[in-house]
Image: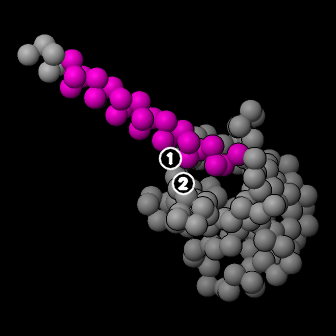
Amino acid sequence: MQKNTFILLSIVVVLVASCGSIKDAGSEKLYGAVWELDYISGPRIAFEGLFPDKKPQISFNRETNQISGNAGCNGYSADYTLNGNQISFGEPGPATLMFCGGGEKQFLNMMRKVDGYNFDAEGELNLLVGKVPMLRFKKID
């Protein structure tokens, strides 16, 4: 009986440890890349109309827990908090102050609502509100 209990306990420990390593492996994909927006949910304006000149980009810094990039026109940076597949962003910090249309405002407002992330089958980064992908980014070189 004790042998069966030991075997069962060992299996549970291995399963728990492997699930933890899978979760950590997902967050590793965030780092060392520049992610460029290729979809935003919500606005009634075509994506190309929101970002006619430059698409928003985001990069994650593991050491400082900050993101940085551009919002389609102006640069931004903000703190982020990561807990498993949950993510949240602080208020964007110093940015340039050019006006470039409504796309930037749409993007930053949506970033404030994000509470999770995942990667799809193509390796694209989805930022979620609940379980719904609201922003989708592709990795660029």
**Which type of secondary structure does the marked residue at label 2 adopt?**
strand
Residue 22 covered by magenta stretch: yes
Using the image, tell me which numbered label, if any, was put on residue 69: none
CB of mark 1 within 8 Å of CB of mark 2?
Answer: yes
Q: Residue 69, how many percent across, how many down?
A: 81, 56
Label 2 CA crowd tier, 10 Å (few <14, some 14–19, many 20+): many
Q: Nearer the viewer, residue 91 or 87?
A: 87
The quarter of the picture where the N terminus appears is top left
Residues drawn in magenta:
6-31
Q: Nearer the viewer, residue 122 or 51?
A: 122
The answer to whether one can see residue 43 in this image is yes
Query: Between 109 and 85, which is closer to the camera in this rendering?
Result: 85
> Dot 1: few (<14), some (14–19), or many (≥20) neighbours within 10 Å?
some
Q: Is residue 16 left or right of residue 125?
A: left
Residue drawn at point x = 62 percent, y = 55 percent: 112
Mark 1 vs 2, N-terminal side: 1
Q: Left or right? Give the position of 87 relative to 47.
A: left
Q: Is residue 2 above or below residue 35?
A: above
Residue at image position (91%, 67%) is 98
Compared across the picture, whether 49 is left or right of 116 comes to right
Query: What amino acid does circle 1 point to?
Result: Asn
Q: Position of residue 106 (x, y in %)?
A: 68, 70
What residue is pinned by disc 2? 117
- Helix, strand or loop for disc 1: loop
- Which residue: 57% across, 76% down? 42
On the question of residue 78 being in view, the answer is no
Marking on residue 85:
1
